Amino acid sequence: GENVEQHPSTLSVQEGDSAVIKCTYSDSASNYFPWYKQELGKGPQLIIDIRSNVGEKKDQRIAVTLNKTAKHFSLHITETQPEDSAVYFCAAITSGTYKYIFGTGTRLKVLA
Amino acid sequence: DVKVTQSSRYLVKRTGEKVFLECVQDMDHENMFWYRQDPGLGLRLIYFSYDVKMKEKGDIPEGYSVSREKKERFSLILESASTNQTSMYLCASSRDSPYNSPLHFGNGTRLTVT
């Protein structure tokens, strides 16, 4: 079945450094790729997304890139801050369906 | 701001009990979802509903059922709880299909079955 692989499972960076989380999807029909951030004790919250007709999208310190040929997409966080510490989930979905396929999550720790 | 409220933060139930997890959203969203979150497995869809009284199975519906009698409320039912249903359960809603509008999640219910 369809799946999304996410790496790494844990990531520790020094405050101010960059963090990159990578996902690979299997269903070539997938055309929407959101990223969710889950802080401790809370539900996941959408932080950025990208559709298949775009190669890159940026929102302040976060950016997402998409390589449709390789079926890869990545989250980039620059100038990391302690409040970026959380679990991040990538996901993929195809238009016309209701089922996200989520990655297994990355626990990001930003060390002060 | 959309609010998705799950009635319990923590629940402890015994094997064989019937368990109800309740979820309410306040933004008149059409769609509601129940996910299960386990370490190393990510979020897995149990059931979803795209309209009142309508329901569809997700990827792991076995051992669960759902009820949506009113638009704002979506209940997850464990007919006979088992220890392998110990998990974090997340409810979500979306205004439109997830392709067109984001999921809004509640803060989760951590269920322990002993």
Image (cartoon, coloured by chain):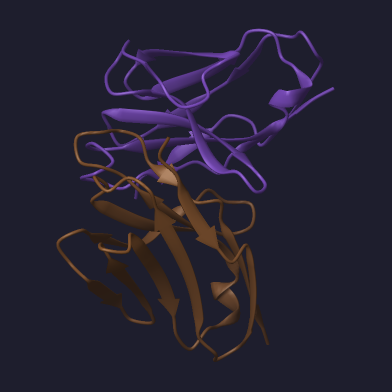
Chain colours: A brown, B purple
Residue A5 lies left or right of residue A75; in this view the side is: right
Seen as rendered, the residue at the extreme right is: B114
Nearest the viewer among A35 and B9 is A35
Residue B19 in the image, given as x and y percentages of width and height: 66, 14
**Residue at image coords 71%, 14%:** B81
Nearest the viewer among B32 and B41 is B41
Above or below, B59 against A17 in this view is: above
**Residue at image coords 54%, 90%:** A17
Residue A18 in the image, given as x and y percentages of width and height: 50, 86
**Residue at image coords 49%, 70%:** A21
Quadrant, the N terminus of chain A? top left
**To which quarter of the image does residue A67 belong?**
bottom left
Quadrant, the C terminus of chain A? bottom right
**Residue at image coords 31%, 29%:** B31
Residue A56 lies left or right of residue A21; in this view the side is: left
Seen as rendered, the residue at the extreme left is: A53
Residue A35 in the image, given as x and y percentages of width and height: 40, 59
